[in-house]
Image (cartoon, rainbow, N blue to C red):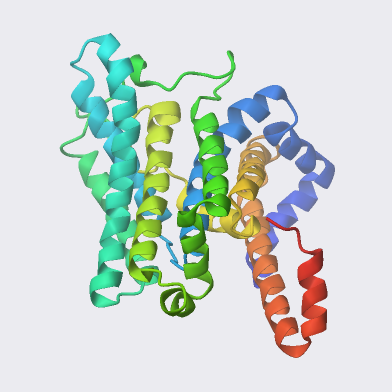
């Protein structure tokens, strides 16, 4: 009701324009043409898969990492710094060494940014929900300072870092589109995470720690602090790589609004996927299609893109409501809880 009240005027615009015209614009912008699929939806899906995977792994370990946005910005900064350093190298060295170095720097800085919250949790018991949110704002302000100061382009005209040389651009997968190799890296990371969670000792320890840390420590002999810290750092590294991929594959420079909120949308992506790394791929593509279609609706039909934000919020509320229903059912009727769990898709 609150969402409908807030977005009421926007829905009124949609009704005035005509729902058919609005939906047609949404379809054209998200999945209606090959160009929309490969140059809009899948390009947007790449950072959402990376950051959604980061959130999913952290949540599976019982770590409420809400800081994927800040870790994304830290990773983007790392890639931009590498770009500014290697621009003086020979072109061949830029491509062979500079590109992996940029992605690695993104992962390291993302992990380091998450490591601050991990250290605060382990040393002082600071709730990671609080610390990671605060670190998001610090990262945003730090990027604003850097692109107006030490990292600003040489002409000092635009608040951004120098444009990356072409040798540091991620290769395009399909000629004539914007889809780059980063999408393959994101899908590959999700596949590796799914395999690791299901088949490795690390994945078992992470899942058990997230399910019941006290039992994991007492009955399983698991070092819970070590597992949660490792999950925190891995989560930050994935979000950082997302930022580096965005710089080297799409933006080719660092600027303040390089992320439209990927780190926050990632929470919805992970929740919709039920924290399953494989399902994160489909969930990320869905949210990317919603955002790509929202842009087309605003551009072609004059309907504000906030309408899609309401849809995303409704999805999150529906997920939370379903989880609350399952929890209440389990307490009230174990037999009914078994039936509900039986019809849920397994990982």
Q: Quadrant of residue 250?
A: top left
Q: Is residue 228 visible?
A: yes
* Residue 282 horizontal/vertical position (percent): 66, 44
Q: What residue appears at the point 69 percent right and 73 percent down from the top-left corner?
A: 321
Q: What residue appears at the point 72 percent right and 82 percent down from the top-left corner?
A: 330
Q: Is residue 321 above or below residue 36?
A: below
Taking depth in this image into account, of 136 and 273 the one nearest to the observer is 273
Q: Is residue 206 above or below residue 41?
A: below
Q: Is residue 35 above or below residue 19?
A: above
* Residue 283 horizontal/vertical position (percent): 64, 48
Taking depth in this image into account, of 200 and 258 the one nearest to the observer is 200
Q: Is residue 160 visible?
A: no
* Residue 143 horizontal/vertical position (percent): 27, 45
- Relative to 104, is 194 on the left or the right? right
Q: What residue appears at the point 29 percent right and 29 percent down from the top-left corner?
A: 101
Q: Is residue 298 above or below residue 155?
A: below
* Quadrant for the C terminus in the image: bottom right
* Residue 214 horizontal/vertical position (percent): 44, 80
């Amino acid at each position: 009701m609150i969402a409908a009240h807030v977005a009421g005027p926007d829905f009124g615009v949609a009704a005035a324009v005509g729902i058919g015209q609005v939906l047609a614009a949404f379809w054209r912008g998200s999945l209606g043409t090959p160009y929309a699929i490969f140059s809009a939806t899948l390009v947007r899906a790449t950072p959402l898969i990376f950051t959604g995977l980061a959130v999913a792994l952290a949540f599976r370990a019982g770590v409420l990492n809400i800081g994927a946005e800040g870790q994304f910005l830290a990773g983007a900064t790392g890639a931009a710094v590498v770009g500014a350093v290697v621009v003086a190298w020979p072109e061949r060295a830029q491509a062979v060494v500079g590109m992996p170095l940029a992605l690695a720097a993104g992962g390291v800085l993302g992990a380091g940014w998450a490591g601050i919250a991990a250290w605060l949790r382990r040393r002082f018991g600071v709730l990671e929900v609080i610390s990671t949110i605060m670190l998001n704002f610090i990262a945003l302000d730090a990027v604003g300072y850097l692109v107006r100061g030490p990292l600003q382009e040489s002409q000092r005209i635009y608040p951004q870092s120098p444009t990356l040389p072409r040798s540091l651009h991620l290769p395009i997968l399909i000629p004539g589109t914007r889809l780059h190799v980063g999408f393959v890296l994101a899908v590959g990371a999700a596949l590796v995470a799914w395999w690791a969670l299901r088949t490795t000792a690390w994945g078992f320890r992470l899942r058990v720690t997230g399910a019941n840390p006290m039992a994991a420590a007492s009955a399983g002999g698991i070092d819970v602090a070590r597992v949660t810290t490792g999950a925190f750092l891995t989560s930050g590294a994935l979000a950082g790589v997302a930022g580096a991929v965005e710089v080297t594959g799409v933006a080719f420079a660092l600027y303040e609004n390089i992320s439209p909120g990927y780190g926050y949308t990632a929470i919805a992506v992970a929740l919709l996927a039920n924290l399953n790394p494989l399902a994160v791929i489909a969930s990320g593509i869905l949210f990317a299609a919603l955002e790509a279609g929202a842009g087309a609706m605003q551009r072609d039909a004059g309907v504000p893109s906030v309408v899609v934000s309401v849809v995303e919020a409704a999805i999150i509320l529906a997920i939370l409501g379903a989880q609350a229903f399952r929890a209440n059912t389990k307490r009230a009727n174990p037999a009914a809880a078994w039936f509900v769990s039986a019809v849920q898709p397994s990982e």
